[in-house]
Image (cartoon, rainbow, N blue to C red):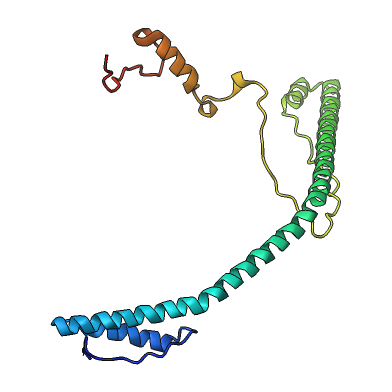
Amino acid sequence: MTTTAGTSITMPFDPRGDEREVSLAVQRARALIIANQENYLAAAELHVQFKRRRDQAFEYLDPQCKAAAAAHKAAVKTRDTVVRMYEEPCEIIGRKMSEYQAEQNRIAERKRREALEAARKEEEDRRLAMAVEAERMGDREGAAEILERPVTPPPIVMPKEAPKPDGVSYMKLWKFRILDENLVPRQFCTPDEKKLGAYVRSMKEAACVPGVDVYCELSQPIRR
């Protein structure tokens, strides 16, 4: 249904923002037709009415919003204050636990390597004894074959890790340290652009670097 600007509407103010009344106001605003000066003046009056009721809604609800915001801000401040109280002891204890666990991991790795080396040595001794026995029996080819076989020690079964306490977990952070930069593969190396720039600015057209294009660009004109 179409409504001209001269039609009066009744939309009692509802501070709760009643969806039905707001929807009705939108429908009537969309159906509004301004065909002449009279419609225009009536539309202006209707516009003022809606603005007034909008402002009334804001004035009614804004203090509640501010009070809720202030309460939220106070609650957040209290929460953060209490949480920060426990952060330091948690951080100290967590750091010590991580250091202990890292040391246990290093000990376990050392024991694993020692056990692997012992197993390898035992396998080598066993292989050597077999070769000696083959040699003693006159089987030189068999002895040579035994000695040429790759030494494959049996799998190492390490003791299970101590059970972790409830509520404790670790996130593995894989890091690295460079032992010899000369051995680092090319794809992991980044050219030093700062050093390249200084070299090119110094040598100008005489600059020559393999894999690098040296060129000159003109800046904006400089007044003399």
- Residue 207 in picture, x, y percent from top left: 39, 10
Residue 209 in sight in this render: no
- Given residues 175 and 157, the one toward you in this image is 175
- Residue 68 in picture, x, y percent from top left: 60, 72
Q: Residue at x 40, y 89 (%)?
A: 20
Is 185 located above or below residue 155 in the figure? Answer: above
- The quarter holding residue 210 reads top left
Q: In which quadrant will I find the C terminus?
A: top left
Q: Residue at x 34, y 85 (%)?
A: 25
- Given residues 129 and 62, the one toward you in this image is 62
- Residue 128 in picture, x, y percent from top left: 83, 25
- Left or right, 72 with respect to 117, comes to left
Q: In which quadrant will I find the N terminus?
A: bottom left
- Residue 44 in picture, x, y percent from top left: 25, 79
- Left or right, 176 with respect to 156, comes to left
Q: Residue at x 28, y 23 (%)?
A: 220
